[in-house]
Amino acid sequence: MNEQRFPHLFQPLDLGFTTLPNRLLMGSMHTGLEDRVWNYDKLTAYFVARARGGVGLMVTGGIAPNRRGSLAPLASKLTNRWEVMRHRKLTDGVHAAGGRICMQILHAGRYAYHPFSVAPSAIQAPINPFKPKALGAAGVKRQIRDFIRCAKLARRAGYDGVEVMGSEGYFINQFLVPRTNHRKDEWGGAFENRMRVPVDIVRGIRKAVGEDFIIIYRLSMLDMLADGNSFDEVVELGKAVERAGATIINTGIGWHETRIPTIATSVPRAAFTWVTRKMRDEVSIPLVTTNRINMPGTAEKVLAEGDADMISMARPFLADPDWAIKAEADRVDEINTCIACNQACLDHVFENKKATCLVNPRAARETELVIAPAARPKKVAVVGAGPAGLAAATTAAQRGHAVTLFEADRRIGGQFNMAKRIPGKEEFVETLRYFNRLIELHGVEVRLHERVEESALAQGGFDEIIIATGVLPRDPKIDGQDHPMVLSYPDVLKGDKSVGKRVAVVGAGGIGFDVSEFLLHENVPETPDPENVDVKHFFDEWGVDMDFETRGGVEGVQPDRDDPPRKIWMTQRSKGKPGAGLGKTTGWIHRKTLKNHGVEMLAGVAYDRIDDAGLHLTVKGGDGGEEKRVLQVDNVVLCTGQVSENALFETLKDNGLPVHLIGGAKLAAELDAKRAIEEGTRLAATL
Ligand code: FAD
Ligand code: NAP
Ligand code: SF4
């Protein structure tokens, strides 16, 4: 047997009464399946897959200790013995698969999305239309008792422990800081009073559940809010929680209302482990670190450097349930890496849809989207090796079909080869690495540099032909667009055209934003390395004090931003907010990043013409008035949407061949990689 490549990651952790097999914690992630009793079989299958995949300890999505604390009307809670039954099914399944699981107790406080919310003070959250009611002293004590009752029920349901959610700005966090706690009684004022709620909760739970039950306390270590906790306060609370009986302390970073990215793909890998590290000399129970750790090498380094005792990852286990066994067996190149896009997980949760994963559409749908061996192996052609074609080809081959994948370009990846070059999207490189490995593993025959025609496909004797030929940039038909200063987004992102110092980006969709971000940087590599993104630069840009000498790590800190290499204007014809269609949890980051670097966004414009003077616009004002403007620019970059490239499909269909259409080739409007990969996977699962 080879020497273990990740010795720290796969070292058991002795908790006294039980030993965890490795240092991997699957962090709490709401899937939406928790909320309905009839979805518990699906939820069980989801956790069982991850338990089989070797993660040491898992934590459920947040379960409320009472109705007022639930995230939304009818969201999951555990308040009585009838509700225990559904959880029992889940814990039995996990234990039979050799796993361990804790239940997260989450009281939403003022983040509850319903009119019955309660909080330390009646202060509305900036991200919630509902104003909470301030609790009386008896009400506070009732919430504490409800946490304790919930933990006892969790034990009865067979969980190995609970996680008390004390971070991300939820109920407990709201007691801890003056921003949300204006109380004058024994629960407000001095920090000793403000921290009484979590300490009483942990102490009460320990007393109620006995010694042989895991209590994880999720401690908000870096609020990243003005008026957040100071480091000394965080330490004081950590020590008190340890004395009260916690087994493990997990790291919480930021509140939901924090306007600094914490988990988006633009956050460098392992960016926040320094925060956990600061706590290591202060408490003696194991510490878990978290946020943007997605690959074994990163996790191992964090542990080896002594930043923490355990690594929490949530989304990476959505992306790949077998992450742990692949890492342990040194099959790292087979890991389907979470690219931190949030598009199918967090964005879904915030849109009230069930979570799944952009790179793994089977996540939380293990019972519905089944990849079984094919009843009869077929000869399959896939045309186009973008995300849709890659998903289809590799899934079909995995099922035993003989697959030939045709790609006109010199490499696989389609538009992902442009996306991966956008600073902050370096993780897309991993998806291409993963598909390359699947191609090898399942024996897909790849024919690069081959723009395949109808005749070759007709003569190839294929049982099934899948057309995944993607899109073409939309022609906006602007007067003067053949001027040499005009470039398309592929001209810019494929790197062969230089761009001047003053640029107009026409179109403010996902690609317009990405092109603008790209142009704010110079010398962007063809294939960036997601492991080597500068952490200090990230915190300087967003104004976070890595010495944590100021409240919340941000109070009074001035961002230190690079001067952008270009002046950029971004335009759109419609009047709404530019970037309104971007991801729910990430759109604000894209908008803020561009604004922070002086990008001017113009909405409600008409394009008059392009000539030597630049881009001529008519800007329509809110009062119905109009203003003529000329953006005097060196280049105009067209990012005006996409149209399907589906001519091949139409010809094949007319000739009666067995042809299927997926991805951008099928529908370009509102196409993203989530739909492309899901369509490819679903089609191939049925062939
Ligand atoms: P494509 O990726 O367009 O692939 C089609 C492939 O078919 C191409 O490689 C092409 O060369 C090949 N082809 C065409 N005709 C033939 C032929 N006759 N023979 C052989 N090969 C052929 N989506 C997200 O979800 N999130 C993001 O953050 C995101 N960021 C993006 C950033 C940028 C800069 C860009 C450009 C796109 C981004 N997208 C993003 C969109 C995403 O990349 C697309 O939705 C996705 O690539 C569509 O996949 P597809 O397989 O349908 O098509
Ligand atoms: P898009 O989001 O549809 O945006 C197209 C932009 O072009 C809009 O701003 C639109 O605004 C403008 N436009 C459309 N027709 C035009 C015309 N005839 N003349 C001038 N302007 C026109 O498309 P995209 O930016 O090309 O992105 C393609 C897909 O990739 C998207 O659907 C997106 O899902 C995906 N993507 C996602 C991300 C992400 O971060 N999630 C990033 C990049 C791409 P007006 O009509 O108002 O002018
Ligand atoms: Fe990661 Fe994106 Fe999948 Fe969420 S949807 S788990 S962020 S890859």
Image (cartoon, rainbow, N blue to C red):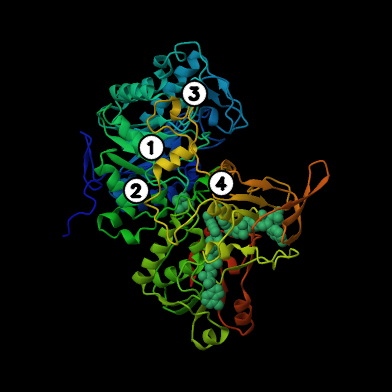
Spatial separation of the CA atoms under disc 3 and disc 4: 25 Å
Instruction: Give the total of numbered labels.
Output: 4
Q: Is mark 4 within 8 Å of ligand 2?
A: yes
Pick whichever of labels 2 and 1 is earlier in the sequence: 2
Pick whichever of labels 3 and 4 is earlier in the sequence: 3
C-beta proximity under 8 Å, tags 4 and 2: no
User: Element at badge 2?
Assistant: helix
Taking the image as shown, residue 571 lies to the left or right of residue 583, namely: right
Q: Residue 227: which numbered mark, if any?
A: 3
In the picture as drawn, the residue positioned furthest to the top comes out as 185
User: Element at badge 3?
Assistant: loop
Spatial separation of the CA atoms under disc 4 and disc 1: 34 Å
Pick whichever of labels 4 and 1 is earlier in the sequence: 1
Instruction: Name the one closer to the observer, 603 or 650.
Output: 603
> Crowding near pointer 1: few (<14 within 10 Å), some, many (20+)?
many
Q: Can you identify the residue that label 2 sits on?
A: 93
Spatial separation of the CA atoms under disc 2 and disc 3: 44 Å
Rendering quarter of residue 376: bottom left
> Crowding near pointer 2: few (<14 within 10 Å), some, many (20+)?
some
Pick whichever of labels 4 and 2 is earlier in the sequence: 2
Pick whichever of labels 2 and 3 is earlier in the sequence: 2
Q: Can you identify the residue that label 4 sits on?
A: 590
C-beta proximity under 8 Å, tags 3 and 1: no
Instruction: Name the one closer to the observer, 163 or 613.
Output: 613
Residue ID at (46%, 13%)? 189
**Which quadrant is home to the N terminus?**
bottom left
- Rendered location of residue 287, percent (x, y): 30, 34
In this view, the mark in front (4 or 1): 4
Pick whichever of labels 3 and 1 is earlier in the sequence: 1
Residue ID at (46%, 25%)? 228
Residue type at tag 4: His
Residue type at tag 1: Met
